[in-house]
Image: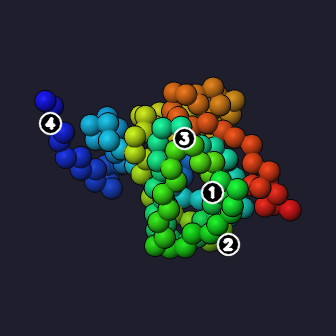
């Protein structure tokens, strides 16, 4: 029987990905396969997470500041500072800053695959070092499956 050790990640030691606006905290390799966590900043008017779903993972959102517009299935909701949302597997979702200020959100995914390399890939895409098509090619590897959402597309009209 293996013993899972506590995982302490100090803010000063967390890996930052500035182009993607992501700070990596604990991945499944740090938590005995239990969860992965990160913090993201979303700027108003900038593209954020497009519609996607996770086939295996549940995703918890905790809004630290600002507000977040979220696609949840076929609905669009707004989360405010202090709100928590848990998105179960196979639920289409997307998110972006709502309003005129940036949103800061802490995410935890459970029953997740290792995800830190996905965020590092995303960082390279934002820097123009990697083609965005590589993200879609990693859907099964990172359990991040992009989906179409007419509801999300219509929000901009």
Q: Which residue is mark 1?
A: 72
Mark number displayed over residue 54 = 3
Count of numbered marks: 4
Which tag, 3 or 4, sits closer to the chain's start? Answer: 4
Q: Which residue is mark 2?
A: 99
Nearer to me, 3 or 87: 87
Between the C-alphas of marks 3 and 4, the distance is 28 Å
Between the C-alphas of marks 4 and 2, the distance is 45 Å
Q: Which residue is mark 4?
A: 3
Give residue 143's position: percent from left, percent from top: 52, 34
User: Where 119 falls versus 14 (above or below)?
Assistant: above
Q: Are marks 3 and 2 in contact (CB under 8 Å)?
A: no
Identify the element where label 1 is drawn.
strand
Q: Is the residue marked by circle 1 packed among few (<14), some (14-19), or many (20+) residues within 10 Å? A: some
Which tag, 1 or 3, sits closer to the chain's start? Answer: 3
Which tag, 4 or 2, sits closer to the chain's start? Answer: 4
Give residue 82's position: percent from left, percent from top: 46, 73
Identify the element where label 4 is drawn.
loop
User: Where 70 falls versus 92 (above or below)?
Assistant: below
Q: From this viewpoint, is residue 46 visible?
A: no
Which tag, 3 or 2, sits closer to the chain's start? Answer: 3
Residue at 32 percent of width and 54 percent of height: 12
Give residue 1's position: percent from left, percent from top: 13, 30
Between the C-alphas of marks 1 and 4, the distance is 36 Å
Nearer to me, 157 or 71: 71
> Is 112 on the left-hand or right-hand side of 10?
right
């Amino acid at each position: 029987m293996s013993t899972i050790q506590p995982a302490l990640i100090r803010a000063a030691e967390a890996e930052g990905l500035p182009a993607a606006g992501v700070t990596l905290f604990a991945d499944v390799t740090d938590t005995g396969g239990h969860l992965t966590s990160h913090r993201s900043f979303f700027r108003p008017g900038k593209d954020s997470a497009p519609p996607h779903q996770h086939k295996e993972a549940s995703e918890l959102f905790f809004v630290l500041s600002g507000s977040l517009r979220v696609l949840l299935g076929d609905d669009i909701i707004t989360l405010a500072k202090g709100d928590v949302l848990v998105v179960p597997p196979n639920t289409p979702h997307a998110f972006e800053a709502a309003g005129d200020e940036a949103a800061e959100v802490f995410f935890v995914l459970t029953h997740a695959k290792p995800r830190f390399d996905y965020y590092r890939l995303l960082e390279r895409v934002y820097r123009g070092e990697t083609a965005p098509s590589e993200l879609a090619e990693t859907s099964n590897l990172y359990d991040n499956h992009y989906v179409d959402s007419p509801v999300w597309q219509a929000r901009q009209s």
